[in-house]
Image: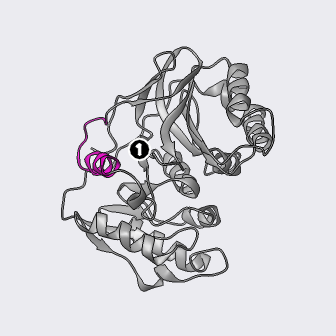
Amino acid sequence: MRTPRAYQPPPALSPGDRVAVIAPASAFDRPSFEAGLALIAARYQVSYGAGLFERQRYLAGTDERRFTELAAALGDPAIRGIFCVRGGYGATRLLGRLAALPPAPPKPLIGFSDITALHLWLQSHGTVSVHGPVLTQLPQLSPATCARLFAMLESGTPPPALRAAQTYVPGVAEGPLLGGSLSMLTRVLGTPYMPDLEGAILLLEDVGERPYRLDRMWTHLALAGAFARVRGIALGIFVNCEEKDADYRAADVLRELAAATGLPCAAGFPIGHGDLNDPVPLGARVRLDAGARTLTFLEGAVA
């Protein structure tokens, strides 16, 4: 197995820094937006454009609007960090346009779910980003999650370790943490926007995917050779993934699939679409001890 790539962390934020709020995917409801905005505006100077509230069918405006907003946030040196309002769907539609962007210094980008597509693009360029709550989810989570996020963004210190609920396959592995939403990972797989998984610890979580769909997407990864390249698997929370009236659970399917890889795997880390979504640095080196059910961060999210 080749040595995994090293990823560059962006510069740390400081209270009072200017940050951008963007909507690169689905449209969102205004009350959740305002509640999330209040949390980050108490710490940073927040900028967003009037077009943020546009809608086109299931998207937060046209591809052109969303791409222009994203490109401006990435390229503006005065913007020190980028918070995504919501996931849903739409980020993959922007990937083809990102290749035309001129190089710019890295900055933290925060989000999850559909935002996984942007994380994968950043990791394909060797940059660390933050898999964490989107703006509209942040008010629904505990104050401890918000505190963890701000600490991650403002300190190069590795964040506290996370603990899983179950061991699927015991073992220990180290490598950069890559991944996010299982469904988004399989959509980007095979495109130029997918990072090299060699030596990685693969993070997977999802919402609303019935067990056979989880099986189908996992099998896609297996057939593409993903599990031959990664060193371990950290499973987050899989929400609303049960089959009605079935005599099996999604966890049964995931455990069986994980066992077939033979890779160290722990399940139930507090990451994803549930009541817990602790932020984690993607691209940072981690140590997965599946037997002890711990994910220890060896690097921080920022420099």
The location of residue 102, given as percent across then percent down, is: 45, 65
Q: Which residues are magenta?
A: 143-159
The location of residue 130, given as percent across then percent down, is: 41, 49
Position of residue 56 relative to residue 92, above or below, is: below
| Image-quadrant location for residue 228 | top right
Q: Nearer the viewer, residue 3 or 129?
A: 129
Position of residue 103 relative to residue 148, above or below, is: below
| Image-quadrant location for residue 136 | bottom left
Q: Nearer the viewer, residue 109 or 89?
A: 89
What residue is at 51 percent from the left and 28 percent from the top?
A: 165
What residue is at 40 percent from the left and 36 percent from the top?
A: 284
The C terminus lies in quadrant: top left
- Does residue 209 show up? yes
What residue is at 38 percent from the left and 62 percent from the top?
A: 82
Q: Nearer the viewer, residue 138 or 45?
A: 138
| Image-quadrant location for residue 61 | bottom right
Q: Residue furthest front?
A: 245
Q: Nearer the viewer, residue 62 or 100?
A: 62
Amino acid beneath label 1: Asp
What residue is at 71 percent from the left and 36 percent from the top?
A: 250
The location of residue 190, given as percent across then percent down, is: 71, 46
In the drawing, does residue 62 fall left or right of residue 127? Answer: right
The residue singled out by tag 1 in the image is: 278
The N terminus lies in quadrant: top right
Magenta stretch holds residue 144:
yes
Is the residue marked by circle 1 packed among few (<14), some (14-19), or many (20+) residues within 10 Å? many
Main SS of the magenta part reads helix
